[in-house]
Image: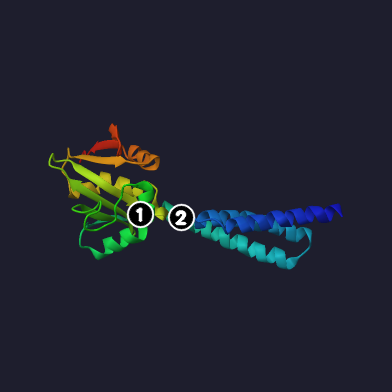
Amino acid sequence: MSFNIWYEGIGLTASLLIALSMTMRHIRSLRIINLMGCIVFVAYGILIQSLSVTFLNVFTIAVNVIFLVNHRIEQARPEAFDVLFKNTGDDEYIRRFIFHHTKDIVHFFPSFDPDPETGTLAGTECCLILRQTLPVSLVSFRRTTGGEISVVLDYAVPAYRDYKNGKFFFEKAVSQIASPGTVFTAVGEVPAHVSYLKKLGFEAFQEDEKGQHFKKEFKG
């Protein structure tokens, strides 16, 4: 009886790991936890002498390992970044991009107004950051009378929120819109965006009811 209880405990642990993997939003996390569950299931299958349970999970382990190895190889390859400048006001794709992501944008930019005519982006210039030709980030900016460039929106879709988009824009793409010495400004309204700006080398210089104000000089 005690052995049966131990066996069922191992089987239950494996089942819980498999169930947990199904709740993961990111495919890599799903594969890793699923792999752990399959390994425990193989042990369970051996203990209860079930060829079907053992074989199925050995096969699933192989599939998970192949995926994780390929994912690691893909991650190690240099990504192809590009920038596509757009007209904020009349570009249909930009309108659809904003409409689709408005809820998430507001999470990082609480004062964001999506109205294309009178909202936050009215009168701005913008660009899409492309990774492997996929549009993953939208940057909108406005030139001030003092020669500075105010970044009013710098939004990345969830799957590509890893600072690489911002680094590409502020280190390389800006050469197409600014000359060396140009100062870029931005306002961090929430802690996550403040942390992002600091990570990209922006320096805080003022704080008011809008949030923390940052600036960064383009070195060229």
Distance between mark 1 and mark 2 Cα atoms: 12 Å
> x, y (%) of residue 156?
35, 52
Amino acid at pointer 1? Glu
Who is closer to the viewer here, 215 or 105?
105
Quarter of the view holding residue 197:
top left
Task: Tell me whether circle 1 and circle 2 mark residues in contact (CB < 8 Å).
Answer: no
In the rendered image, is residue 202 in sight?
Answer: no
Q: Nearer the viewer, mark 1 or mark 2?
A: 1
Q: Is residue 192 visible?
A: yes
Q: Residue at x 31, y 47 (%)?
A: 111
Mark 1 or mark 2, which has the lower sequence index? 2
Q: Is residue 58 rendered to the left or right of residue 177? A: right
Please tell me whether mark 2 sits on a helix, a strand or a loop: helix
Quarter of the image containing the C terminus? top left
Q: Residue at x 51, y 58 (%)?
A: 27
Q: Which mark is residue 150?
A: none
Q: Secondary structure at mark 1?
A: loop
Q: Residue furthest top?
A: 205
x then y, percent, for residue 162: 39, 48
- Say which amino acid is labelled 2: Ile
Q: Which mark is residue 79?
A: 1
- Looking at the image, residue 178 sits to the left or right of residue 132; the answer is left
Q: 76 or 155: nearer the eye?
A: 155
Q: Which residue is mark 2?
A: 73
Answer with left or right where residue 146 lies relative to residue 117.
left
Q: Nearer the viewer, residue 156 or 33?
A: 156
Q: Is 211 on the left-hand or right-hand side of 70?
A: left
Q: How many marks?
A: 2
